[in-house]
Amino acid sequence: MKDMYQNDNKEKLVIISVYAPDEIYLSKEVEFLKEKYSIVLFRKEDKFYSNVRVKNESDIEIVEIPMVEKRSLHFYAHLFLSLFRKETVQELLFLIQQRKWSIRLLKKILWEATVSHSDTLYIKRTISQNKESFYKPSIYTYRLNSGALTAINLKNILDGKKCIGRAHGIDLYEYRDSADYLPFRKYIMKNI
């Protein structure tokens, strides 16, 4: 990471975007936000989309988060570790209590928890190389999915000022989701 904050008096803003096409819309927000904030945008590696519009300009920093490859050792390590997180256990118990239990929903919960765990550790390692530049940042997530879980984890790790999440229709309404279920919804709403 370049040291872009040496003489910067602006408040720090960490943006997390884990869904590459979002950046089509996110570019407008970044243009607005960079007037007030020093921005570091953490986004997924763009392997599938060519229409990414947030460019790595001199006044913002973009850090690519590697994709979690299913069925890799890396994936299974993060899956195992995410099983012991309090919010994952609570979400699994919630499914049982609501009698919504199914293999499909179990996979959805474990995928979100695994991706969040992997992304949190990657961002934490990246930031630790320049931790003084990230003193009490604000953290913004573009969707209420695994990116929101990552944002909540980072807020706790970095002692962040605030954690802000932007919700879209699919993040708000269960009927808009193909599985008719939004993992970690209660936890995210409580902590964002």
Image (cartoon, grey):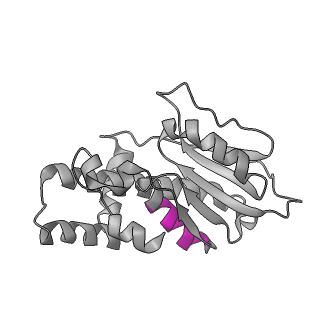
What residue do we see at 86% from left, 59% from top? 6
Point out residue 185 in the picture as x, y percentages from the top left corner.
34, 64
Residue 115 appears anywhere in the view: yes
Report whether 97 appears left or right of 113. left
Residue 155: say if magenta. yes
What residue do we see at 63% from left, 49% from top? 41
Point out residue 184 in the picture as x, y percentages from the top left corner.
33, 63
Q: Main secondary structure of the magenta part?
A: helix
Report whether 137 appears left or right of 109. right
Residue 85 appears anywhere in the view: no
Picture quadrant where residue 126 is located = bottom right
Task: Identify the residue at the far top of this view.
Answer: 50
Picture quadrant where residue 89 is located = bottom left
Name the foreground residue: 34 vs 95. 34
Point out residue 50 in the picture as x, y percentages from the top left corner.
54, 24
Report whether 23 appears left or right of 130. left
Name the foreground residue: 154 vs 183. 183
Q: Is residue 29 above or below residue 188?
A: above
Query: What is the tally of numbered marks visible in this picture?
Result: 0
Residue bounds of the magenta highlight: 149-158
Residue 44: say if magenta. no
Q: Is residue 111 above or below residue 50?
A: below
Task: Identify the residue at the far right of this view.
Answer: 7
Point out residue 75 in the picture as x, y percentages from the top left corner.
35, 47
What residue do we see at 59% from left, 48% from top? 42
What residue do we see at 35% from left, 62% from top? 81
Name the foreground residue: 188 vs 173. 173
